Amino acid sequence: MNTSRGYSLPVRAIVAMLLSACLLGVVAGCSSKQGEDGESAGSAGIVLKGAGSTFDSILFKSWFTAYHHSHPNVVVSYAVVGSGEGVRRFIGQNVDEKDRVDFGASDSAMSDGQIAQVSQGVVMIPITAGGIVLAYNIPGYQGELRLSREAYAGIFLGEIKNWNDPRIARTNAGAKLPDLTITTVVRQDSSGTTFAFTKHLDAISLQFRGHYGPATFINWPGNAMRAPGNEGVAARIQQSAGSIGYIEYGFSRQLDLPIATLENRDGKFVKPTEPAFVAGLASAELPENLRAFVPDPVGPNSYPIVTYSWVLLRSNNGDAAKAAMLRDLFRWCLQDGQQYSSGLGYIELPAGVAVKSLAALSSVGPQ
């Protein structure tokens, strides 16, 4: 059960409004003159435009605002449109000029085929990491909800349809689970969060692997409701009795949603906590291209659904001033910015990963 309760109703309302605003985007910084798209850095400043992952959006909002405070000539405009759309805008083919970006962000990284479409070259940098949780809305239920691998895979395969199903009751002895229809809440957009979740389901369920496999968009079976972004899924869960959905951990904290304890690869039931996320990522080996996934972490203390999230940059930016500013911005995020992670539901990058990210960042040019 999520223990981070205690928001007053006005604060929760404000949080909900902020999350809804994420659908339109995040603009860090203020200016006396703002254009129609909300971007301005003043008369002598620079605007850095990005788009992509909703998984990152809570952290990015804090990062980009803090960076602007110490670099008032820089405004970072980030459109929270989902990883798939962020990659599309970053690639830039058949994209309106107003939607072209200086950087992208994605929780599914980029495939070799996508990278080949960027003539300037691509640098993918792990920028943050965290866990994907299963948040739920079971009216009147106050206990811990423990879901086995069989149970949560069965729920999202559309096979387990009621909350009092024996496969759920089996790991919740003594709990009074209602005779209530389960409704899954899933992403309607192309999503890195979906990719990380389905990559995990692909690793643990032969049936899921045979029918779907890992993807940024799934035509989910059964009784599924669709919503845009992590914030949209979180809001829909909050509003819908009997629902369960997958979201980045920070969004469950923002709306104070109850979250399930999940069975990991070692057969242990693990609550989603920062130490459990860290343990889950510990076995990841970063290759030279820094694209690593941990679909089913080993270790008794590991939370089973964890992921890195990447910033996407061009090797040859073409604009020396912007390239230098992008290097400085993300150097700050990889160093000073990591201290913001824990309080917002993310984890600080392991030291070794941060070092590799910083080294890759230095290759963003022209120098």
Image (cartoon, rainbow, N blue to C red):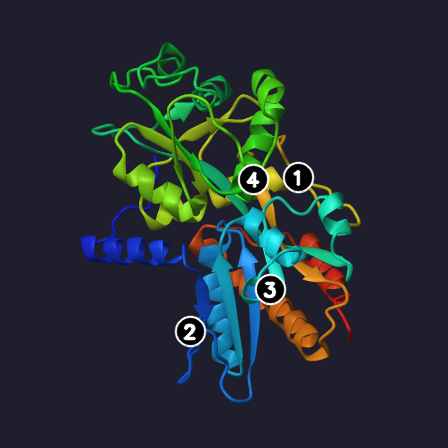
The spot of residue 65 in percent (x, y) is 46, 71
Q: CA distance from mark 3 to mark 2?
A: 17 Å
Q: Quadrant of the N terminus?
A: top left
Pointer 3: what residue?
101
Secondary element type, mark 4: strand
Instruction: Please name which of the two marks, 4 or 3, marks the residue nearer to the observer.
Output: 3
Residue at 58% from the left image edge and 46% from the top image edge = 107
Residue at 55% from the left image edge and 62% from the top image edge = 99
Instruction: Please name which of the two marks, 4 or 2, marks the residue nearer to the observer.
Output: 2
Secondary element type, mark 3: loop
Residue at 20% from the left image edge and 29% from the top image edge = 140
The spot of residue 79 in percent (x, y) is 49, 60
Relative depth, front residue between 349 and 45: 45
User: Is residue 269 among the parts visible in the rendering?
Assistant: yes
Pointer 1: what residue?
293
> In terms of image quadrants, where is residue 361?
bottom right
Marks 3 and 2, the one that precedes in the sequence: 2
Marks 4 and 2, the one that precedes in the sequence: 2
Marks 1 and 4, the one that precedes in the sequence: 1
Pointer 2: what residue?
36
The spot of residue 269 in percent (x, y) is 47, 26
Instruction: Please name which of the two marks, 2 or 1, marks the residue nearer to the observer.
Output: 2
Residue found at the far bottom of this picture:
43
Q: Amino acid at mark 1?
A: Phe
Pointer 4: what residue?
306
Relative placement, left or right, of 182 versus 192 is left
